[in-house]
Amino acid sequence: MPKTTFYNLHQEKRDTLIEAAEKEFCRVPVFEASISNIVKEAGVPRGSFYQYFENKEDAFFYLLKEQGKKRQELFVSLLKKHHGDIFDALNEMYEQMLKEMSQGENMKLIRNALLHVTHEIEDVFTEMFAADRKKDKFREIAALIDQDKLNLKEDHDLFHIMQIVTAVAFRNLVEKFAKDLPDEEAMDNFVREMNLLKNGLYK
Amino acid sequence: MPKTTFYNLHQEKRDTLIEAAEKEFCRVPVFEASISNIVKEAGVPRGSFYQYFENKEDAFFYLLKEQGKKRQELFVSLLKKHHGDIFDALNEMYEQMLKEMSQGENMKLIRNALLHVTHEIEDVFTEMFAADRKKDKFREIAALIDQDKLNLKEDHDLFHIMQIVTAVAFRNLVEKFAKDLPDEEAMDNFVREMNLLKNGLYK
DNA sequence: CATTTTATATGACAGCGTGTCACAAGTCAA
DNA sequence: TTGACTTGTGACACGCTGTCATATAAAATG
């Protein structure tokens, strides 16, 4: 979290700083970004940066969370628009994000957050279950799966199912680590979510 | 990917290096890890490290992928054991990973991979949809959702449903970025997966 | 209004880590 | 033995980070 000094800043100066930071974090992923570039761009002395933020990551997550807040507002309004149907709301939200990506700069920051590290790590997990339809390993594993039990309607459904279970398992693992959940709770969460996946989220 | 020089190394030296790298990456997340520590520990000159790996990340992902391979083998064997039922297989796998976590050192590397950055970024996304049951925002949004449409059986199911759709949406977004998919394909994938979620993965 | 107290600004600097490069030392085939 | 090629080595230039002593401004006090 930025320090209070940051919030006490005159809006003008704060905006300059934010813009400079945004520019840097749009340019490269966090681990390549440099404070030197930010302060140079913003025209503030190096020491000042540390007056406002703990470090690079602090500034980065501040910006990312601001983005998050905006999206949340959007999600709320879409939920209202679609009379509380999360799938419809999510659908429109996703569509809108895709549009923004192809156009503007504003998604570059998110892009840099998701690619690099995050993606690479997720990839390793995906490969654990060979959920990559292009790989031979996928065929090998697909052959092992009892497909009669699964709700396969379209051609690539098996692939998507693997993607889904991997994503949810991954999420569970991250949560277990992050919150240091006791094993029973972690397992209970996992089982519940897998059951929801099996039976469907809709009535 | 490690350079060929690395694979040409005598097993003994390679193992020393791997162990030293493992130690460092278990100690701290990648971005805090230092090559200096690895080479000091392994007793090899700094220059040699660059003979074998492109850089820090290269070494890290090499180790992580090795872990991934082992898990994949385990998954395959579990699939066989459970006669092709992915849910049963996944279940046992998850259980086993939980056990390992509480015991040994071998999960620390994965832990460091998942926490830091990955987790922080996922968190921002989770918050977009306020899928955190402790937050007030969750209640606010929960109230907006038409729960009659959802397959809610147990108390926290709504929370888990939010978790699931967020995880899957997140995964889709990452993939769109990483593979630079055309919008139609990205949207198509997304819609298919959401439909699978709605209707359930099991017959 | 003068003075003390508190908050903010500044930039030089120590310290550290990275990646490179010129040179040394091996390996191997002819 | 020689030459061609591969691998080993560690000093070093470069850049970046976070700090700190000092300067400046702003606010509080009486």
Image: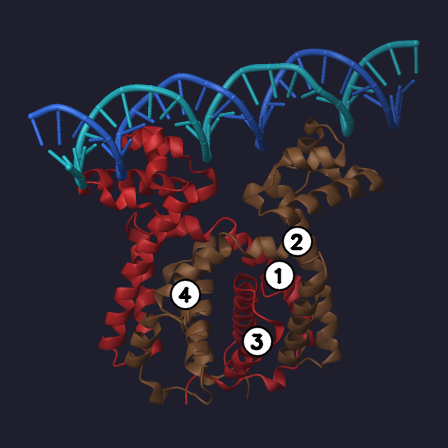
Chain colours: A red, B brown, C blue, D cyan
Residue situated in front as seen by the camera: D27 or C14: D27
**Chain under numbered label 4:** B
Please state the chain letter of the residue tagged with numbered disc 2 in the rendered image. Answer: B
Q: Nearer the viewer, mark 2 or mark 1?
A: 2
Q: CA separation, marks 3 and 2?
A: 28 Å
Query: Percent from the top left, x then y, of residue B188?
Result: 41, 69
- The residue to which callout 2 is attached is B65
Mark closer to the observer (1, 4): 4
Horizontally, residue A101 falls left or right of residue B164, namely: left
Residue under label 3, please give it: A185
Are discs 3 and 2 less than 8 Å apart at CB? no
Marks 1,4: beta carbons within 8 A: no
Marks 2 and 1 close (CB-CB < 8 Å): yes
- Which corner quadrant of the image does residue C10 belong to? top left
In front: label 3 or label 1: 3
Quadrant where the C terminus of chain B is found in the figure: bottom right
Figure check: A18 above or below B87: above
Q: Which mark is residue A28?
A: none
Q: Which mark is residue B126?
A: 4
Residue B52 visible somewhere in the drawing = no
- Decide: is A149 above or below B175: below
Residue at (55%, 52%) from the top-left corner? A120
Chain at tag 1: A
- Left or right position of A166 against B163: right
Residue in view at x 54 percent, y 74 percent: A161
Query: Is residue B183 visible in the rendered structure shown here?
Result: yes
User: Foreground residue, A10 or C26?
Assistant: A10
CB of mark 3 within 8 Å of CB of mark 4? no
Amino acid at pointer 3: Glu
Mark-to-mark CA distance, 2 and 1: 9 Å
Give the Cα separation between the discs numbered 1 and 4: 24 Å
